[in-house]
Image (tube, helix red, strand yellow):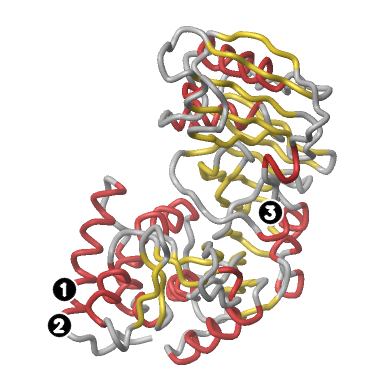
């Protein structure tokens, strides 16, 4: 692969982007990845139409070339598909595929530690840019990428061919990996998971690395880097960073009022002194710890509910919708709150216990947590073997 003939404006954009990525990582990029950014330019892989801003307004390269190029070379994610590819017309738009922020792309490539000759499996092809970068370093024919969306897979395959990049693009369920080209030295996911699929362990060599973004129903945050052993178990630590879309086959589609709360539910009332924003606010370490303990609990805020004396309400629910809790804030006092709980589990009590455990153990961040996956299941842990993460519920 040779460096393409780029316009001066794009060369400046790539140079500035590489500077921003190195600053974000806190260390210079490996020369081979910097070279890959020039040989496999992001602009060749981002679609002609992207979606920008909170309202996901469309931006077309033909009609708005400068805005499109700014979006492509900003150190930020850019939404490349909405509503799983269906036309939302004037309806609600939601992001279903995106090109990840370049800083997290290169951070993950650095963590993956790919070298020439490594066989790599990528889960989640997306635009194809990440696969192209991998192929530049691992070598032609050494990268397999799996994409569940057949349209995205076809488009990415076309872009890779146009750029002269040899990658095996497979349409399929990423949770199944791709046994046809196994075993692999490295496996990297560009979508988050709530549990590690066992086919990944089976298809990676002993000593090989699995790197995947992590999500719990509580929060999408963290990267999990695992090493596979001779027994086809894997173990490794988390690190901060990342917020990736969830693997499609692990999605849930729950709404509090539609799927959880019923008119005949009679919740128990109590009071609490734990401010609900302590467990759902800006402290990502707290949220990550909550998610590691309450593995099947999710939350949402309801501001200004139509309830007298309530300014804001935090809802909690299990993913199977059998238990829920609500914590009301009157907008005045931060010392006492009203809690409502329904179902076989007392979810707010569990949340209080999880938060107390986190503070008792010196408020650990993601980098102190890890996960071991065996044929019989997953075991979360802290870096201190005497401080195992409790399973609540």
State the separation of the CA atoms marked 3 and 2: 42 Å
Query: For residue 178, what is the image quadrant?
Result: bottom right
State the separation of the CA atoms marked 2 and 1: 6 Å
Earlier in the chain: of badge 3 and badge 1, it is 1
Contact check, label 2 and label 1, Cβ < 8 Å: yes
Task: Give the residue at x 47% y 14%.
Answer: 362
- Vertical placement of 157 versus 13: above or below? below
Q: For the N terminus, which image quadrant? A: bottom left
Q: Nearer the viewer, residue 252 or 372?
A: 252
Callout 3 crowding tier (Cα within 10 Å): few <14, some 14–19, many ≥20: few
- The picture places residue 372, in percent across and down from the top left corner, at 69, 36
State the separation of the CA atoms marked 3 and 1: 39 Å
Task: Look at discs 3 and 1 and give the one toward the viewer.
Answer: 3
- The picture places residue 393, in percent across and down from the top left corner, at 77, 22
Residue 229 bears which disc, if any? Answer: none
| Residue marked by disc 1 | 12
- The picture places residue 225, in percent across and down from the top left corner, at 56, 45
Earlier in the chain: of badge 3 and badge 2, it is 2
Callout 2 crowding tier (Cα within 10 Å): few <14, some 14–19, many ≥20: few
- Helix, strand, or loop for circle 3? loop
Q: Nearer the viewer, residue 199 or 114?
A: 199
Count of marks overlaid on the render: 3
Query: For residue 326, what is the image quadrant?
Result: top right
Task: Give the residue at x 69% y 41%.
Answer: 257
| Residue marked by disc 3 | 251
| Residue marked by disc 2 | 8
Task: Give the residue at x 68% y 19%.
Answer: 340
């Amino acid at each position: 692969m040779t460096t393409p003939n780029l316009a001066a404006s794009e060369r400046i954009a790539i140079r500035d982007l590489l500077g921003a990525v190195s600053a974000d990582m806190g260390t210079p990029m490996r020369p081979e990845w910097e070279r890959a950014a020039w040989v496999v330019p992001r602009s060749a892989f981002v679609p002609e139409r992207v979606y920008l801003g909170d309202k996901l307004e469309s931006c077309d390269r033909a009609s708005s070339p400068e805005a499109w190029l700014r979006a492509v070379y900003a150190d930020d994610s850019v939404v490349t598909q909405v509503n799983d590819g269906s036309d939302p017309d004037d309806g609600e738009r939601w992001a279903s595929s995106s090109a990840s922020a370049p800083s997290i792309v290169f951070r993950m490539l650095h963590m993956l530690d790919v070298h020439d000759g490594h066989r790599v499996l990528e889960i989640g092809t997306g635009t194809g840019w990440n696969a192209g970068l991998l192929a530049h370093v691992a070598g032609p024919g050494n990268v397999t990428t799996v994409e569940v969306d057949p349209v995205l897979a076809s488009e990415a395959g076309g872009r890779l061919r146009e750029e002269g990049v040899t990658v095996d693009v497979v349409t399929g369920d990423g949770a199944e990996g791709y046994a046809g080209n196994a075993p692999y030295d490295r496996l990297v996911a560009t979508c988050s998971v709530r549990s590690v699929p066992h086919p990944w362990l089976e298809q990676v060599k002993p000593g090989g690395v699995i790197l995947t973004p992590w999500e719990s129903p509580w929060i999408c945050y963290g990267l999990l880097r695992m090493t596979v052993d001779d027994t086809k178990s894997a173990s490794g630590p988390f690190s901060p960073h990342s917020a990736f879309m969830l693997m499609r086959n692990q999605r849930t589609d729950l709404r509090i009022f539609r799927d959880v709360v019923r008119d005949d539910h009679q919740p128990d009332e109590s009071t609490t002194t734990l401010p609900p924003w302590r467990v759902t606010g800006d402290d990502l370490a707290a949220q990550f710890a909550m998610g590691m303990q309450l593995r099947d609990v999710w939350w949402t805020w309801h501001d200004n509910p139509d309830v007298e004396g309530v300014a804001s309400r935090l809802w909690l629910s299990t993913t199977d919708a059998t238990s829920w809790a609500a914590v009301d804030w009157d907008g005045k006092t931060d010392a006492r709150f009203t809690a409502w709980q329904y179902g076989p589990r007392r979810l707010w009590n569990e949340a209080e216990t999880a938060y107390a455990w986190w503070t008792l153990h010196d408020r650990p961040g993601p980098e102190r947590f890890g996960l071991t996956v065996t044929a019989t299941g997953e075991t979360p842990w802290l870096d201190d073997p005497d401080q195992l993460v409790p399973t609540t519920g």
